[in-house]
Amino acid sequence: QVQLEETGGGLVQAGGSLRLSCAASGRTFSSYNMGWFRQGPGKDREFVAAIDQSGGSIFYLDSVKGRFAISRDNAKKMVYLQMNSLKPEGTAVYYCGDRGYRGTYFQAQTYDYWGQGTQVSVSS
């Protein structure tokens, strides 16, 4: 059974930074592709960033390129999302997901496991 737990959310002013962490347990973490998604009030879950098993392939939502950075530490079974220059439209619950070996990095429905999410609120 895979378990994912996100931490690091909070309230920040526009222009500020937060670092989200996702702790994984339950299987060989280094073998699986991971991603971060977010879901704002009344909206669908939206792709934010993804990283492959080794960290060699990374993808971002266009609107966060240059401001957000995804990384992973396979020894610690952790995935991180560094978020800089945050904007009010970034207010959402942020989720860490595990899509195993398959699927498409930007499609939420192809992810097998999710954490409970962590709230990020950006004030203007």
Image (cartoon, grey):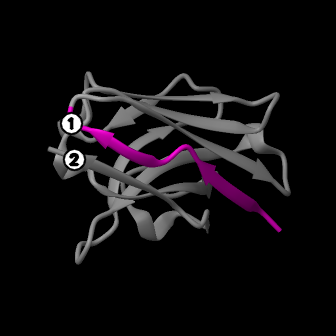
Looking at the picture, which amino acid does disc 1 mark?
Ala
> Measured from the top left, where is residue 81 in percent x and y?
48, 35
Q: Crowding at label 1, few (<14), some or many (≥20) Cα neighbours within 10 Å?
A: some
Looking at the picture, which amino acid does disc 2 mark?
Ser
Figure check: 2 above or below 12: below
**1 and 2 marks in contact (CB < 8 Å):** yes
Residue situated in front as seen by the camera: 65 or 110: 65
Residue situated in front as seen by the camera: 21 or 30: 21
Figure check: 24 above or below 2: above
If the image is split into quadrants, where does the N terminus sit?
Answer: bottom right
Was residue 11 drawn as part of the magenta stretch in this picture? yes
Residue 79: quadrant of the picture: top right
Tag 2 residue: 123
Tag 1 residue: 14
Figure check: 9 above or below 44: above
> Measured from the top left, where is residue 33 in percent x and y?
60, 45
* Residue at the spot 49% in from the left edge and 65% down from the top edge: 110
Q: Is residue 11 left or right of residue 91?
A: right
> Measured from the top left, where is residue 12 in percent x and y?
33, 40
Q: Is residue 5 left or right of residue 37?
A: right
Q: Secondary structure at mark 2?
A: strand
Residue 78: quadrant of the picture: top right
Q: Crowding at label 2, few (<14), some or many (≥20) Cα neighbours within 10 Å?
A: some
* Residue at the spot 21% in from the left edge and 36% down from the top edge: 14
Q: Earlier in the sequence, mark 1 or mark 2?
A: 1
> Measured from the top left, where is residue 71 in percent x and y?
55, 27
If the image is split into quadrants, where does the C terminus sit?
Answer: top left
Farthest residue in the left direction?
124
* Residue at the spot 74% in from the left edge and 49% down from the top edge: 24
What residue span does the magenta drawing correspond to?
1-14
Residue 60: quadrant of the picture: top left
Was residue 37 drawn as part of the magenta stretch in this picture? no
